Image (cartoon, rainbow, N blue to C red):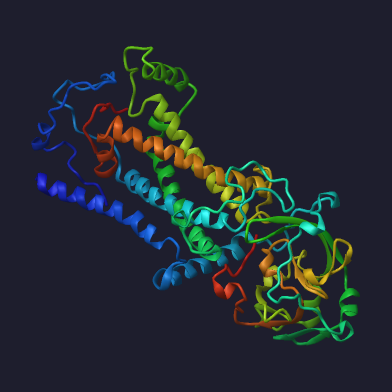
Amino acid sequence: MTDRRLSRRDLFRLGLAAGPASLVAACGWDGGPHLGPKLHAVSKVNDWVGEKLFLSSSRLAPQYPRSLRTAPRDFPAYSISHPLPVVADPAAWALEVKGLVAQPQRLTLAMIQALPRVTYTVKHHCVEGWTAIATWTGAPLSSVIALAQPTAAARYLRFDSFDHGYFNGWDLKSAMHPQTILAYAWNDRPLTPAHGAPLRLYAPIKLGYKLTKFLTAMTLTAEQPGGYWENQGYPWLGGV
Amino acid sequence: MSDNGPATPPAAHAEDDAAGTPGALGTPGAAAAPGKRPLVHRHHWLVRVTHWANAVLLVGMIASGLQIYNAFGHFGPRGGPFYPNPFDGKPFPPWSRLGGWLAGGLNWHFALAWPFVFTGAAYLLYMVFSGEWRSLLFRPRDVPRAIAMQLYYLRLRREHPPQGKHNALQKGAYTSILLLAVISVLSGFAIYKPAQLSWLTALFGGYELARYWHFWAVFLFLAFTLVHVTLVLVVDPASLRAMITGWYRGRFPSHD
């Protein structure tokens, strides 16, 4: 009787030791070949929950007074290419809208600036944990999507850039959000190369790495596009 | 892990614990007669499973959280000012981190958050529906009892104040740690979805402060664990067995 209970107790102890020990062994890796795919699967579930449960298609992210804006020199700007990618001939630049659309578009900056204009002062959330406040001006992405008329099969968008192949995939619900814009101005001035000139994607409802800079094309797709960082393990939805 | 153990202890075990001498801290009010400490069933299997599960999950949550912290080791907006933080700008050592890099830390953190919240919720639901919350929740009437207990520990009072399953100071500690867990989860959601849950983020004083409280919760958890484990091992080692098997035979057998 005593032996049986002791062995059961030993089993418990073994289990208690094995849990933390396996965690300690896991330290330093992002899951490895065995757990990595499982963590990725959970991340997919979190994307689903983030889009279906948390994301509202109408709720607006908080806006701030201009007086709370982060000093421009303190607002970080990341790019993959160094030095900064710059369009050689701004007059020749255009955004291609293609894929599962009835009316493919080729939009010059002037055409995008002629669309309805949205300006807001919002908080930028970086996946690293920092925030910065700035004013952004642009055309609602929903108005560009309306021009292109997506087919019924279109569920995602892929945004391409001229920044060393940087790209992102978006869900249609976030893309149609009233605060999702194609931005051409930052803090009331034309977008600088550091912030993605001539045109970048902006929204206060997604993390910074989802906001493709240096745009060249927008493609509507049926399959979920990956993304530059997303393909390396970052959460795909990136909604805040 | 269902516990279908005997409701009455097997006779063979009733005599194997002869140590009945009161310890240095004295005999509690409802103490058993020396030499015959009763074996009582103290913790439901659900309490034991969620206790150990959350202990392991908390280690993973903290380690992956420290990995995430390393990406931006400050609290406050870009350009500052930053909130006071003794770890400002300092990376935590590799052995304390889980995930290897920011994306790995995030994926661990968001994956472990599910079982952490579910086991916590299962525990809280059990406490509410079993009525066990009465023996754990610190209420206003526990204030004088906590003072009496403190006086006893300071040797300003001779007798151990009468207590139920836990004394008033334990109730205070366990209630606080549950509150801390709830605050950790809520501040976690506040920094996970600061736009969609902006009302919740605002409750914590904004994104930067929510992140600040979420970080400090780590050190409160660590401080609690240090004191908790020390007291278990030094004052009442029998309670360790009770949290593993459910059965308790020790100096504080009273049960309310």
A100 w.r.t. A140: above or below: below
Kindly tell me whether residue A152 is visible in this rendering: no
Q: Nearer the viewer, residue A26 or A104?
A: A26
Specify the quadrant of the image occupied by residue A227. Answer: bottom right
> From where the camera sits, is residue B121 visible?
yes
Q: Residue at x 30, y 56 (%)?
A: A18
Residue B135 occupies quadrant: top left
Q: Is residue A66 above or below residue B230?
A: below
Query: Residue at coordinates 44% horizontally, 18% vertically from top-left?
Result: B147
> Total number of numbered labels?
0
Residue B6 found in image quarter: top left
Q: Is residue B198 left or right of residue B150?
A: right
Q: Residue at x 67, y 48 (%)?
A: B208
In the rendered image, residue A237, in percent from the top left (x then y), is placed at 61, 68
Instruction: Give the vertical position of B71 relative to A40 (above or below).
Output: above
**Which residue is nearer to you in this view: B197 or A121?**
A121
* Location of residue B255 with respect to A205 vertically, above or below: above
Residue A111, position in %: x, y?
A: 89, 79
Residue B9 x %, y %: 15, 36
The answer to whether residue B154 is left or right of residue B11 is: right
Q: Quadrant of the C terminus of chain B?
A: top left
For residue A236, side relative to residue A125 (left or right): left
Q: Measured from the top left, where is residue B143 in percent x and y? A: 47, 20
